[in-house]
Image (cartoon, helix red, strand yellow):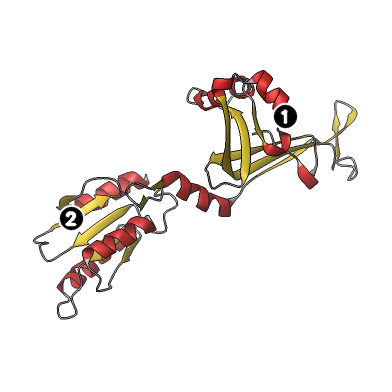
Amino acid sequence: MAADTGPIGGNLSHEFVILAETGESKIFTDKRIFDVSSKETKLEKKSLINLRENYEKYYAVTDEKFNEKEFKEKVPEEFRLNTKGIEVGHIFYFGDKYSKPMNAAVDYQGKKEFVKMGSYGVGVSRLVGAIIEAKYDDKNEIMKWPISVAPYDCAILPLVNKNDNTNLEKAKKISDFLTKQNIDFIIDDTDENFSSKIKKFNLLGIPFQIMIGNKTEGDKFEFKELNEDSKNITIEEITNIIKQKKS
């Protein structure tokens, strides 16, 4: 989204925004911009210019750059969108605003040229809120972290009884195996019932769960990926599934 440069200055800046009703950024755009695809784009100048031009066909600005007359002229009514979003990145083009005062120049074909400058950054702390907004399933009360940023790969949920540590011992054996396979995990060793544990970890968002109850027998365990059906499989099969998702 075209955005105000603010105190940083320069004559051009764009925000990268994830749509969310809880976002602090007001945005005005043409809905057709969401149909622009980058799948065929290559890391080549001509291909990248073509992608940029495809995006530039459509009106897309934050509230600081909003012009109602321009919005109505450029966007047919059925494609107008006024919503909110979370800013997760920002890029700026400074030109020679800073290079001239610093005399930051190069010799280009015998001529002094001031360096053209820019900056770009990702708001790491903002990404947390943005991922939650994007991944939270309000209907089922589940928040699933992408495994690339999840605090743990897997949660081990044994049904713990004060008078019987059998399930907890099974959990510790599983954890030893997962450690050797370089899989991060957390064990819930509280004496809560299964329903409470599952509900809690559905909200914590760790992508995979291994459940160990009184009916767990042999070398198979109840295993599930959030938003998927559970299945009874071996720890080796569980490990392979998690590794495939991580790769």
Give the image quarter of residue 94.
top right
111 or 100, which lies in front?
100
124 or 218, which lies in front?
124
Is 204 rendered above or below residue 30?
below
Please say whether residue 163 is visible from this viewpoint. Answer: yes
**N-term-proximal mark, 2 vs 1:** 1
Q: Position of residue 135 (x, y in %)?
A: 42, 46
Q: Position of residue 225 (x, y in %)?
A: 28, 49
Is 126 on the left-hand or right-hand side of 151?
Answer: right
At x 29%, y 46%, the residue is 227
Is the residue marked by circle 2 packed among few (<14), some (14-19), or many (20+) residues within 10 Å?
A: some
Q: Position of residue 51 (x, y in %)?
A: 58, 23
- The residue at which mark 1 appears reads as 67
**Which amino acid, by three-letter code, is at mark 2?**
Glu
Give the image quarter of residue 114.
top right
Q: Position of residue 178 (x, y in %)?
A: 28, 60
- Residue 222 is tagged as 2
Is 129 rendered above or below residue 66?
below
